[in-house]
Amino acid sequence: MTTVFLDGQFMPIAEAKVPVMDRGFLFGDGAYELIPVYSRRPFRLAEHLRRLQHTLDGIRLANPHAEAEWMRLIGEIVARNDGDDQSVYLQVTRGADTKRNHAFPAQVVPTVFIMTEPLVTPPPAQREQGIAAISAPDMRWLRCDLKTISLLANCLLRQQAVDAGCVETLLFRDGFLTEGAASNIFVVRDGVLLAPPKDHLMLPGITYDVVLELDAAHGLPAEVRPVAEAEARGADELWMTSSTKEVLPIVRLDGQPVGRDENAVRPGPVGRRMYDWYQAFKQTVMRAGE
Ligand code: PDD
């Protein structure tokens, strides 16, 4: 049985219960992180915890744990559960009040929940063939840099893709690419990697950073700048990146093939290389931790 951590205790998932007055339940008032674990080693943990701090600062919620304590708790949840490759989910909410009130309660006792699931990355066939995506106007709020549990817009947008038989929805705001419903989006044009800048309109992805680091390490040209919708639609390659999807090529957008060769709907060469670099990098990090 899966073991989770809730408010200071490890317990079987079936026993983990949250009061209905919890502000996470009533208002979606909380922060979360999702950390991939390879061979029982959390990947880029310090960076995930730094982003958690950024979110907590953004929603004015004091971090209930110091970094070392988070690391200990995450290490323990990984050790207590099966599987070498896991996906650790942690959530901090503003806790339970005695009555429903939009303004913060005077006494804030945050709820801390950590669970882990098997890490499921895209199957090889999906990676090799690439995936189809749709697009939609980005109708989310203006603090998309915060990883909050208020994910209704993201859920609706992802469901739109699923309803259309696709995997992801690319979001455009005011004529520019922001990101995906639950991923960051990269564009390749004429051998140059284009990435929207990390601002309030997108989540600063941990995978996004790794991709840009690998790009620089291999001497590929990259431009981090606003990407116009027309540039994304006319891309040679499109990829989605996230902790669970890693680097996944998009070969159709709104039914149109991505790339110049309309007869060959298949992932492009830059994305293939990036995927290989990403896998090699993961191996290096895991070995270095030994
Ligand atoms: N989501 N943008 C959004 C809106 C996301 O939800 C995610 C990831 C990303 C990629 O971030 P990272 O590379 O740090 O995983 C970008 C996670 C996987 C989730 O919500 O489950």
Image: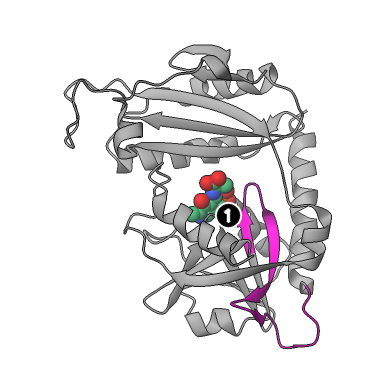
Residue 197 x %, y %: 46, 65
Mark 1 residue's CB less than 8 Å from ligand 1: no
Identify the residue at the far front of this view. 163
Quick check: 207 above or below 201? above
Q: Nearer the viewer, residue 20 or 132?
A: 20
Q: Answer left or right for 173 relative to 189.
A: left
Quick check: 152 above or below 129? above
Q: Answer left or right for 36 relative to 9.
A: right
Quick check: 89 above or below 6? below
* Quadrant position of the C terminus in the picture: top right
Question: Image quarter for residue 209?
Answer: bottom right
**What residue is rendered at 67% in x and 52% in y?**
245
Residue 4 at least partly seen: yes
Residue 75 x %, y %: 62, 22
* Quadrant position of the N terminus in the picture: top right
Q: Provide the secondary structure element on which disc 1 rests.
A: helix
Q: Nearer the viewer, residue 18 or 216?
A: 18
Residue 257 x %, y %: 69, 81
Q: Amino acid at mark 1?
A: Asp
Residue, disc 1? 209
Residue 45 x %, y %: 58, 35
Q: Answer left or right for 117 relative to 147.
A: right
**What residue is rendered at 42% in x and 48% in y?**
151
Whether 248 is among the magenta residues is yes
Question: Image quarter for residue 140?
Answer: bottom left
Question: What is the number of callouts on the image?
Answer: 1
Callout 1: few (<14), some (14-19), or many (20+) C-alpha neighbours within 10 Å? Answer: few
Question: Image quarter for residue 30?
Answer: top left
Which stretch is magenta? 240-266
Whether 130 is among the magenta residues is no
Residue 206 at least partly seen: no
Quick check: 194 above or below 4? below
